Image (cartoon, rainbow, N blue to C red):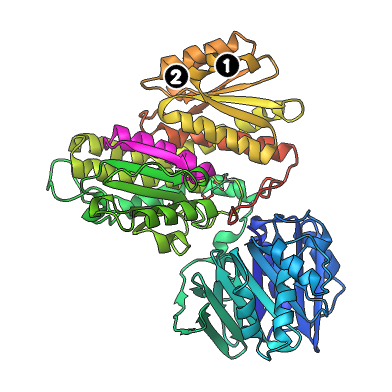
Amino acid sequence: MCGIVGYIGTQAATDILISGLERLEYRGYDSAGVATVEEGQVNCVKAKGKLLKLREKLEHVVSKAQIGIGHTRWATHGKPEEHNAHPHLNSARTLAVVQNGIIENYLELKEELISNGVEFISETDTEVIPHLISQFLANSTSLLEAVQQTIAKLEGAFAIAVVSADHPYELIVARQQAPLVLGFGQGEFFCASDMTAILPHTRTILTLDNEEIAKLTPLGVEIYNFAGDRVSRFPRTLDWNPVQVEKQGFRHYMLKEIYEQPAVVRICLDNYLNPNWHADEDPDYSPINLGLSPNLTDNLEHIQILACGTSWHAALVGKYLLEQVADIPTTVDYASEFRYSPKPIIANTLTVGVTQSGETADTIAALESERARRANLEPKRQAKLIGITNRPESTIAQIVDRVIDTHAGIEIGVAATKTFIAQVMGFYFLALDLAYRRKTISNSKIGEIIAGLRHIPSQIETILDTQADAIEELAHDFTTETEDFIFIGRGINFPIALEGALKLKEISYIHAEAYPAGEMKHGPIALLDNKVPVVAVAMPGSVYEKVISNAQEAKARDARLIGVTTAMNATEAAHTFDDVLTVPEVDELISPVLAVIPLQMLSYHIAAIKGLDVDQPRNLAKSVTVE
Ligand code: M6R
């Protein structure tokens, strides 16, 4: 987390830095700052709180500086206070540093620096960096060399950007496990934690690799590895449209992203379904077009999925599909747990990493360790890795053998919505691809599932068109006194209950728990009374009656019952539920992608009515790039 941005060129740097930080604010927003170099001085302005506060401070500052760095912070070491905000300076205030990541050995380095007489202003891990660079600069005239020497002393995952008053035409950046991209313009160069910060200025981008350091000057970019060798790399031109990152009239990004879901599913269907496939024709022509080579898919005995947060919920839907459709035993682990307690190795395992950002530190580390621990084993025990991600240019792409791009477009709201739907779509395609290759279900069944998938976009549109007002009205009932919610679901819709609860927690700050409906009576039912609403995901199918019975049990304890079910069931459901959120008629196997929509909307409206910061909820960041 944290966002860093840097600029060197011919334009006023501060404006570019601030507009870049606006686009990075989703990465952290407890404080922000910029440092520019002008007339032999480093000018640093910082503010606690959102970027708006920094903007206000800068309103009366006139700066013509053409080089600078900026930072938006998600606190790890030291409270969100102005003195802990980045950039951090050396004692002489001649150089400034921004960092994203964690310097794990900072205490040791800090003690060493203090014993050399250095005074620290902040409690951050980052502040050791400018002091170290400054010490190395005492014996060197090269800023690049001093940064290289400093990096050699740092342990951890980090990305940094450095400017110096004594080297006013150099911006030095480096990357070790934390993301950093460079942007190439006409006589101007950029760096940022995420290319969205750079997109309004250039679409010519280069992603710095791990253990690379770059010197940006008005004349060009030089890249070196940490060993000091010059590296030859070529930027690429993106086809992203900056309009994708605007709110386009919606009150919040999250709402816009909820409404983009039909389009996202259409794009996924267009990309991954073979349009000419027919159930009764050529048996060698696959219905699915994921580009997975046979060495990744043949003889599979086990699939293990690693993910965090909402991606973990998508993985749970995936597990259901991979087991029930493709008949492959599948496990799902939190990447943060798996990396420190990996499962015993099973031969012929496909490992699937799911991460919308492609940068989540735990997911990346779990995948890397999985590859490493299988590296020297016999071939059938070696790692086969694929990634499901919305950012095919991100770090995950460098680790896995194949990426399934979820094509959801940039998601700005911290609460994942359209990327969740797109990840689940990725699992439909993966399960169908494997089912087809392994002949675990008939071609006509595959054809039926595909027909169901093709209906999803218009069905989501129906939900958005017909339910939005009712959901908003319902939301008013929970904005003042409700402190807890329970979500229940079973089978393929238990992950939807989990996802509904997570959405509510993260943006409305209402405590919410999800349980498999059948588990309620084993303990959690003790929580219920008339103050704790229960949301039951009750989609027709194999466990519908069971969920209804479990919902009745909750009702008998005075809980207000909200049901998510299909329109045809609504009359019957009205006897059970106090409030019914309806979705179109759908096969149980496809139902999660519809059932989640009313839950996203309910969370959104509760948070919006409460006047909360829907897109940037407290304590969270979009991309969790620290452990
Ligand atoms: O980028 P990733 O999918 O790896 O992110 C994982 C989680 O941090 C993320 O899903 C988080 O839980 C979201 N805020 C959920 O809305």
Q: Residue furthest right?
A: 60
Front residue of this view, candidates 191 and 344: 344
Q: Is residue 23 above or below residue 279?
A: below
Depth-wise, is mark 1 or mark 2 nearer the camera?
1
Q: How many marks?
A: 2
Residue at 82% across, 76% down: 91
Amino acid carrying mark 2 in the image = Asn
Q: Secondary structure at mark 2?
A: helix
Residue at 40% across, 52% down: 370
Asked which quadrant contains residue 545, the reply is top left
Q: Earlier in the sequence, mark 1 or mark 2?
A: 1
Q: Which residues are magenta?
A: 307-335
| 380 sits to left or right of 539 | left
Which label was assigned to residue 351? none
Which label was assigned to residue 523? 1
How far is disc 1 from disc 2 in space, using C-alphas?
29 Å
Q: Secondary structure at mark 1?
A: loop
| 491 sits to left or right of 474 | left
The quadrant of the rendering that contains the N terminus is bottom right
Amino acid carrying mark 1 in the image = Gly
Q: Position of residue 448 (x, y in %)?
A: 26, 35
Residue identified by numbered label 2:
569
Front residue of this view, candidates 215 and 193: 215
| 252 sits to left or right of 286 | right
